[in-house]
Image (spheres, rainbow, N blue to C red):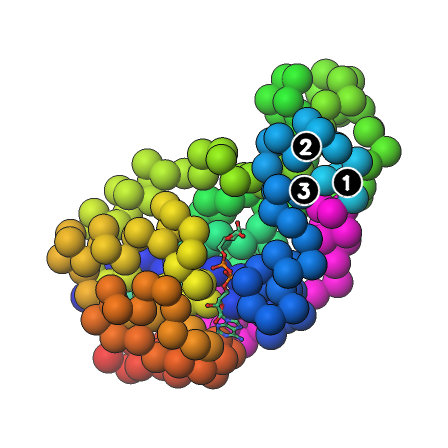
Amino acid sequence: MRNIVVLTGAGISAESGIDTFRDGGGLWERHRVEDVATPEAFARDPELVQRFYDMRRAAVQTKQPNAAHHALARLEAEWRGELLIVTQNVDDLHERAGASRVLHMHGTHLNAWCTACDARHRWTGTLIDKPPCPDCGEASLRPDVVWFGEMPYEMERIYAALRGADLFVAIGTSGAVYPAAGFVQDASQLGARTLELNLARSQGSHWFDESRQGPATQLVPQWVEEMLAG
Ligand code: APR
């Protein structure tokens, strides 16, 4: 057991105070995906979309990584093999906990993407006021987040890592959104052992060799202790 791929979802950041999407009171209960998370929504009402992401970008900067993020950063530092974190999350809590091998397949809140010159810029402020792109000067900045109907990032690197994985672990994800929801089957077919750590059984639990239920801040440090003791 050398190469580990960990997929994380909104559930790993829930105990840091960041809303998940599909749990009770989650973001998609309060906002319609069709209004705030598609390219069509942005074309139709860019202010509504920018306001939604400005609000979330500001909120993320007030949150702190929790014990689950810190445990994964420790595993990255102390594990004898390779560890890659593939996150669906657009927050930067993995990195703020000290992890460096992190792929954001759905983008990140803290980048703005210029659709005129294709540049990406670190961004902590707002976009609703149409600031000019620091490179080309066009007022064409949008959140660097992958919306429904758009291609996720880093797919080639993710599949290459799945091909080399001995262990695939999914943490805090409902298994509702593809292609991430299909990684467990890909990893399994490629010979990896698969483990789910989630508050409740997910839509894909039956695909995993093992599924443990509980809060990430308990399950992840426990699992990391096991791996490092092994
Ligand atoms: N600890 C562990 N798991 C938790 C916790 C917790 N404290 N709180 C919630 N969960 C679990 C829930 O049981 C649920 O299965 O996290 C999962 C969160 O599911 P979603 O809200 O659907 O989030 P996620 O799976 O990351 O969504 C995938 O959908 O909306 C899009 O692009 C968005 O990246 C997102 C993608």
SS type, badge 2:
helix
Of tags 3 and 2, the one toward the viewer is 3
Residue 91 screen position, x and y as percent: 60, 54
Q: Quadrant of the C terminus?
A: bottom left
Q: CA distance from mark 2 to mark 1?
A: 8 Å
Q: Which mark is residue 48?
A: 1
Tell me if residue 22 is in the magenta stretch: no
Say which of 173 and 92 sits in front.
173
Q: Name which residue type carries label 2.
A: Phe
First in residue order: circle 3 vs circle 2? 3
Q: Residue at x 58, y 50 (%)?
A: 90
SS type, badge 3:
helix
Residue 97 screen position, x and y as percent: 56, 64
Q: Left or right: 101 with respect to 98?
A: left
First in residue order: circle 2 vs circle 1? 2
Relative vertical location of residue 122 with respect to residue 190 in this rendering, above or below: above
Q: CA distance from mark 1 to mark 3?
A: 8 Å
Q: Is residue 82 visible?
A: no
Q: Left or right: 147 with respect to 59?
A: left
First in residue order: circle 1 vs circle 3? 3
Residue 140 screen position, x and y as percent: 72, 23
Q: Which mark is residue 35?
A: 3
What range is drawn magenta here? Answer: 52-73
Q: Give the residue at mark 2.
A: 42
Q: Residue at x 71, y 29 (%)?
A: 44
Dominant secondary structure, magenta? helix
Q: Name which residue type carries label 3.
A: Asp
Residue 131 screen position, x and y as percent: 82, 29
Q: Quadrant of residue 27?
A: bottom right
